[in-house]
Image (spheres, rainbow, N blue to C red):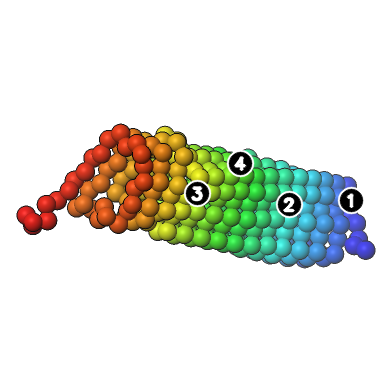
Amino acid sequence: MADLIENRTFTGERALYKVSDLAIRGCTFEDGESHLKHARNLKIEKSTFGWKYPLWHSENIDVADSTFTEGGRAGIWYTKNISLTDTEYAAAKGFRKCEGVSLKNVNLPDAKETLWWCRNISLKNVSASGDYFFMNSSDIKIDGLVLNGNYPFDGCKNIEISNSRLESKDAFWNSENVIVRDSVIVGQYLAWNSKNVTFINCTIESEQGLCYTENLTLKNCRLVNTNLAFEYSTVEAELTGSVLSIKNPAGGRIKAEQIDELILDDTKIDPAKTKIVCPKILKRTEEITDKAEI
């Protein structure tokens, strides 16, 4: 059975440096950096971290019912196999170059520049606010994320998201192998310059969304207040409701109930490479070059 440290306050740098096989309960880590650096096999409950770098280069860490305050900036880097449950994580720049991260019932009110260069990440019932949430990370599974912040998931790979709401400009840029189910995404310029991106049963609201995307798939999705969609994208889309405008898709098939404006310019793309199936196109704007005059 692990030794127990309970109801203590720690100050000073590296207060519990390189400890292992401990249960820590009801403790407060105040001023002093790197309190638990290089720690192993810890179970932490009902504790508060108030200073920088508390869990760097650590391994097999379980944190429950605890708080990381604003002062715990850059709190968890280079750590392997760490779980946070029922925890408030209020510090920016958390989780860098970590592997095996699990967050369940966690609130991140300052998630700026969090979860960068991480692998094997699981989020369940997480709320986050802040720009650049996730960058260059891979193997991500998320269920029940509420995110308010721009530029999330830039450069990420192998992402599965369900039952979530993202209010985010420039989400999923430069990403690869993305599947989003049963979710709502609101924000400009969604999923530009990405590959293998799929949305299933989603509601999307995005100015100039879903452009420059290779192998884009939408199944039973709504594009609300979305204009100039699919420019230079290869796309297979089955859409419900109306779309404000679709512009210059590069190829594929688009099935929609209504398109308010369809813009095709054969000096930019080959319109024949995209099949448009729509019973109601309110306006067509076409620039068709007479090949015989060239």
Alpha carbon of mark 4 to alpha carbon of mark 1: how far? 34 Å
Alpha carbon of mark 1 to alpha carbon of mark 2: how far? 19 Å
Is residue 67 toward the left or the right of residue 208 in the image?
right
Q: Is label 4 in a helix, a strand or a loop? A: strand
Instruction: Please identify, in this view, whether the residue under mark 4 or under mark 1 is nearer the observer.
Output: 4
The answer to whether residue 158 is visible is yes
Mark earlier in primary sequence (4, 1)? 1
Dot 3 crowding, Cα within 10 Å, few <14, some 14–19, many 20+: some
Q: Quickly name the residue at label 4.
A: 146
Q: Quickly name the residue at label 1.
A: 6
Q: What's the residue type where badge 2 is placed?
A: Leu
Mark earlier in primary sequence (2, 3)? 2
Instruction: Please identify, in this view, whether the residue under mark 1 or under mark 2 is nearer the observer.
Output: 2
Dot 1 crowding, Cα within 10 Å, few <14, some 14–19, many 20+: some
Alpha carbon of mark 3 to alpha carbon of mark 4: how far? 22 Å
Instruction: Please identify, in this view, whether the residue under mark 3 or under mark 1 is nearer the observer.
Output: 3
Residue 84 disc label = 2
Mark earlier in primary sequence (3, 4)? 4
Residue drawn at x 82%, y 46% is 46
Is residue 125 toward the left or the right of residue 93 in the image?
right
Residue occupying the far front of the picture: 279
Q: Quickly name the residue at label 3.
A: 219
Look at the numbered discs 4 and 2 and tell me whether their residues touch, using CB distance below 8 Å: no
Look at the numbered discs 1 and 2 and tell me whether their residues touch, using CB distance below 8 Å: no
Mark earlier in primary sequence (3, 1)? 1
Q: What's the residue type where badge 4 is placed?
A: Val
Mark earlier in primary sequence (4, 2)? 2
